[in-house]
Image: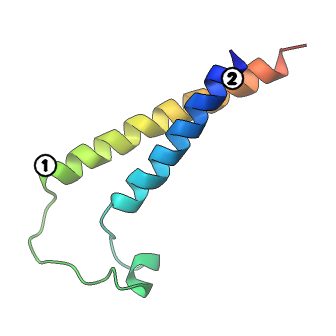
Amino acid sequence: MELLFTVILMLTSALMILLVLLHKGRGGGLSDMFGGGVSSSLGGSSVAERNLDRLTVGIGVIWFATVIALGLLLAYQG
């Protein structure tokens, strides 16, 4: 069971990194320092961006639940 949670944690961690890097920079952060400040003036968020937001939140919830489950499993494994 511990191995399963560890694998899920590794996969969701890699997905979270990928998904966060896919997000468009909002300005004022590190993305501006590296050329991310150049943005189009279309305004609003597209369907793809909203879906990316939903996917990121979903993977984040799975990641958080896996961390809690793995921590509880290891704490009470005795």
Q: Is residue 72 above or below residue 11?
A: above
Residue under the image location 56 percent in, 34 percent down: 64
Query: Circle 1 sits in a helix, a strand or a loop, which is it?
Result: helix
Quadrant of the image containing the C terminus: top right
The amino acid pointed to by label 2 is Leu
Q: Mark 2 = which residue?
A: 3
Residue under the image location 8 percent in, 71 percent down: 42
Between 63 and 29, the one lying in front of the other is 63
Between 75 and 7, the one lying in front of the other is 7
Q: How many marks?
A: 2
**Tag shown at residue 47:** 1
Mark 2 or mark 1, earlier in chain: 2
Residue under the image location 47 percent in, 39 percent down: 60
Task: Please tell me whether mark 2 or mark 1 is closer to you in this view.
Answer: 2
Residue under the image location 33 percent in, 79 percent down: 36
Q: What is the C-alpha distance between the residues marked 2 and 1?
A: 36 Å
- Image location of residue 37, percent across then percent down: 31, 83
